Amino acid sequence: MNKIIAWVDQRFPLTYFIRHELTDYPTPRNLSYWWGFGFLAGFVLVIQIVTGIFLAMHYKPDSSLAFDSVQHIMREVNYGWLIRYLHSTGASAFFAVIYTHMARTLYYGSYRRPRELLWWTGQGLLLLMMATAFMGYLLPWGQMSYWGATVITNLFKATPVYGDQIVTWLRGGFAVDDPTLTRFFSLHYLFPFLIFAAVAIHLVALHTVRSSNPSGINLADKDNIPFHPYFTIKDLFGLGIFMIVYLLIVFFKPDLFIDAANNIPANPMQTPADIVPEWYFLPFYAILRSVPDLAGGVVAMAISVLIFAAMPYLDRSRVTGGARYRPVYRAMFYIFVIDIFVLGYVGAHPPAGTLKVVGEIGTAIYFMTFLLLPFVSRWEEKYVLARGLPPAVEAMARKEIAEAEGNV
Amino acid sequence: MSEENTIKDGADLSRREFLGTVTAGVAAAGVAAACVPFVSSMNPSSDVLAKATTEIDLSGIAPGEEKTFPWQGKPVFVVHRTPEEIAAMEASKGGKDPEPDAKRVQKPEWLVVIGICTHLGCVPNKTESGWLCPCHGSVYDNSGRIISGPAPRNLDLPPYHFVAENKILIGKA
């Protein structure tokens, strides 16, 4: 074995790579469990790819066969029910993990210089994930699949001048039909591999700028410890907790995230009473509905997803450590999180009466948080510096301010 | 880095090695168990298995006639043999894979064989004296025994039994 490894090492940096990027990779010793969600996301991606490949062995992307082939998987294929529920629950698990990963980034200011590119590759991954999930949702060809795809492809009607042509082009017909299903299946199979490649880029960026840490200061070398065994164990423990929750849903409440209407085959002649997207799209869906104009709603929804990319510039405070040393930013963070849950609730219910108003207020708060941040963060920076900070944090903040002003 | 944590006691070392081995073993068993449903899902599904047996009504096959039926997606030849054919087959021992005719039939007038050439899997065509495989010219007699050509074995026999005087169930002996 050692001889084989030596033979490979002369020709390919195998041992070097494993040591440098994995076992001996220097990791801040103060990382909390909040830093384990990236690993969990990678693990769920593997679950989704593996279960997806096995599902594709039995699934038929044809509008007259798709619904029945899913039933075939559920009833006749050995363990088909398990593989399908792992996949359908895995989609929700993926978003839950990624949203937590993003919340950690926002709370601890991990998007700040020099991690902008790391943050943006993550944003790209989120968009790819959303597209993949959306296309995958059409494949069971149930009522929710069909009408969800109809509503979302219709959003492109908002494109000036060419709206109708673009919608027809996306669908490959005048309504969502067999051509839509076959292209969604093709792309749903392709995108996970793009995600996989994007994850590799995300990791290269991460290993260039290294992990942020909850203290906010750049740690001395002696405060970094090798990834193995300290963080392999920590990540695996987190994985154990995650798997317990995930498998409890898979085995005992697998229809938790599957809308009952999706057990009815797609019917282009009748829309179900309540069209509700998957839970992970609900806040964005609420924003879409809160703007009375079609184009305005679509633009608002697109911005609500894309605006996260601007965070490194919207947050103008030079105080490191994220929300930890920044009371105002911390308050804004929690208001934002609560606002997202409120919007999610609004998105899940018909927009009428009070809920409509709540949705509009929630949308306003969502965007105001981002728009106020540049001003609030600069004011807050002065405030916390005057009030006093831990010496290491203050030194880093003053250094960054001096550098920025030196450049001007 | 890990120098401070180096264990000084030899007994501790073996304990650590033991725990490491057990952990790796349990993890490997877990991964293997997780593979089971995936491997199993590639086996025939229950609707495929439901087609594992085929019932055939023999009453429509006249003496001297051969009919082909699908069983598990494969052709099965059923021949209603005439008394002359039975006599000829019982007198012969076959070719390179000798086997008495009585071992190849349950009732002498009914020959039931899998219609797949034992050479490379083509379906032989019926002739007066048996079958001729169109792919590489293997010749079988009216007992499905290989007479000449590249095929190594006689035509295989499916498991079957008579459920009634004129009815057989293929797929179950």
Image: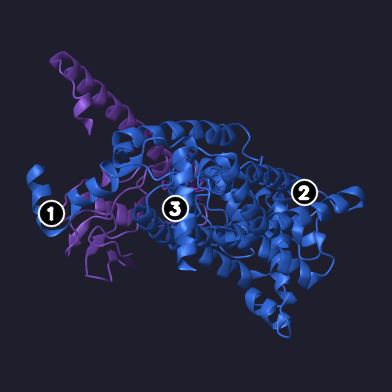
Chain colours: A blue, B purple
Q: Which residue is mark 1?
A: A8
Label 3 is placed on what type of residue?
Answer: Lys
Is residue A332 found left or right of B63 in the rendered image?
right
Q: Which mark is residue A399?
A: 3
Give the quarter of the image for residue A178: bottom right
Residue at the spot 27% in from the left edge and 67% down from the top edge? B133
Say few, some or many: other residues with alpha carbon within 10 Å of mark 2 (under 14 / 14 to 19 / 20 or more). some
Point out the tag, 2 or 1, that comes first from the N-terminus: 1
Is residue A346 found left or right of A97 in the rendered image?
right
Q: Nearer the viewer, mark 3 or mark 1?
A: 3
Label 2 is placed on what type of residue?
Answer: Ala
Q: Is residue A242 above or below residue A373?
A: above
Q: Disc 1 is attached to a residue of which chain?
A: A
Q: Secondary structure at mark 3?
A: helix
Say few, some or many: other residues with alpha carbon within 10 Å of mark 3 (under 14 / 14 to 19 / 20 or more). few
Q: Which mark is residue A314?
A: none
CB under 8 Å between callouts 3 and 1? no
Give the camera-side residue of B34 and A357.
A357
Q: Disc 2 is attached to a residue of which chain?
A: A
Report if residue A78 is visible in the image: no
